[in-house]
């Protein structure tokens, strides 16, 4: 347990973030689970279940700080819902509309054949593909 805390503390320091108690607790919830996708509300519930005292506003702020530091990737599925992804490598997503879950798609599984010319003052940051899927209804 002590080694895990040291690794989390070092990860935050290397990202330029002060390892406060709340950041450490939320980082442990996020990164101990392996690759995952969470909303701020889901992480807040996980924190409550683990008896971590933290406000929803602090969860939002921490997720945004982790994203700015490159520890997380924000995936916006619509104007009202963002997920935070612990997998920051180049990849895409399925969004399951019936369950509101995200699933990773390897970058190599999606081919993008053309991107429009960008104005001179812009450069490409990355391309995010979200493929929306839903369960088929059984035929009678």
Image (spheres, helix red, strand yellow):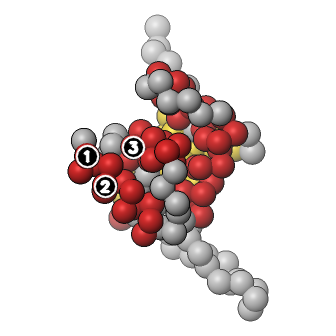
The residue located at (38%, 47%) in the rendering is 31
Residue 79 lies in quadrant: top right
Label 3 and label 1: CA atoms lie apart by 12 Å
98 or 2: nearer the viewer: 2
42 or 100: nearer the viewer: 42
Residue 58 lies in quadrant: top right
Label 1, on which residue? 2
- Element carrying mark 3: helix
One can see residue 25 in this view = yes
Label 3 and label 2: CA atoms lie apart by 11 Å
User: In the rendering, which numbered label is found on residue 46?
Assistant: none
| Residue at the top extreme, as displayed | 140
Label 3, on which residue? 28
Residue 120 at x, y percent in the picture: 74, 91
- Element carrying mark 1: helix
Dots 2, 1 in contact, CB < 8 A: yes
Label 2, on which residue? 6
């Amino acid at each position: 347990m002590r080694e895990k805390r040291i690794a989390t503390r070092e990860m935050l320091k290397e990202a330029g973030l002060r390892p406060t108690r709340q950041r450490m607790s939320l980082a442990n919830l996020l990164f101990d689970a392996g690759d995952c996708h969470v909303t701020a509300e889901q992480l807040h519930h996980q924190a409550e279940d683990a008896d971590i005292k933290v406000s929803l506003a602090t969860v939002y702020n921490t997720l945004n700080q982790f994203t700015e530091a490159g520890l997380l990737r924000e995936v916006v599925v619509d104007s009202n819902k963002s997920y935070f992804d612990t997998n920051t490598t180049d990849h895409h997503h399925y969004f399951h509309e019936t369950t509101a879950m995200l699933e990773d798609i390897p970058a190599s599984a999606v081919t993008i054949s053309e991107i429009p010319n960008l104005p001179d003052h812009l450069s490409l940051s990355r391309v995010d593909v979200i493929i929306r899927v839903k369960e088929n209804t059984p035929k009678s």
